[in-house]
Image: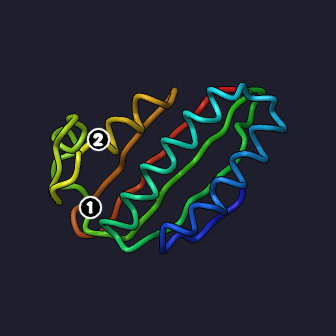
Amino acid sequence: MRIIPVQQRFDFQEVSKEVLALSAALKMPTLKQTQLLTAASELVNNMISFAKGGLVYVSTLSGGSKGILMVFEDKGPGIDNVDLAMVKGFSTIGNAGLGLSNAKQLCDEFHIKTTSGSGTIVTIVKQG
């Protein structure tokens, strides 16, 4: 598992390089690679916008499954209402409000664990 610190949008390049390297090794189809990178980009943008960054963990799945596991962890304010945050178009900062809902739609698995005032952990899986 690789751990990549993210504090600014430029740091997404390292995340992207790791995802591309692992997905190429798994012979993941280009469409699935693009979907995973798009979801990761949305989640990194949220980490930077709401929590001033965090850590991204990237690894291949274990146990014979073919795919990529990513964990996005921050120490930001947390998400007060996850159900509302997942609604397309909902935003607390006046943007399009599509980040979380788009990321979920692009992944095979999507889980959020959040605590108000303590941060958020988003785990995603894309099967290869």
Instruction: Tell me how far mark 1 sits from mark 2, CA to CA.
Output: 18 Å
Task: Determine the image quadrant of residue 32.
Answer: top right
Q: Is residue 74 above or below residue 70?
A: below
Neighbour class for label 2 at 10 Å: few (<14), some, many (≥20)?
some
Q: Nearer the viewer, residue 48 or 9?
A: 9
Residue holding disc 1: 78
Residue 8, given in percent of the width and then of the height, sits at: 48, 72
Amino acid type of the residue that numbered disc 1 sits on in the rendered structure: Gly
Q: What residue is shown with label 2?
A: 98
> Mark 1 packing: few (<14 Cα in 10 Å), some, or many (20+)?
some
Vertical position of residue 5 compared to residue 106: above or below:
below
Under circle 1, the secondary element is loop
| Earlier-in-chain disc, 1 versus 2 | 1
* Amino acid found under the numbered disc labelled 2: Leu
User: Which one is nearer the viewer's eye here, 51 or 1?
Assistant: 51
In the displayed structure, does residue 81 sit left or right of residue 72? left
Q: Residue at x 34, y 70 (%)?
A: 51
Residue 56 image position (x, y, % from top left): 56, 60
Q: Residue furthest right?
A: 25
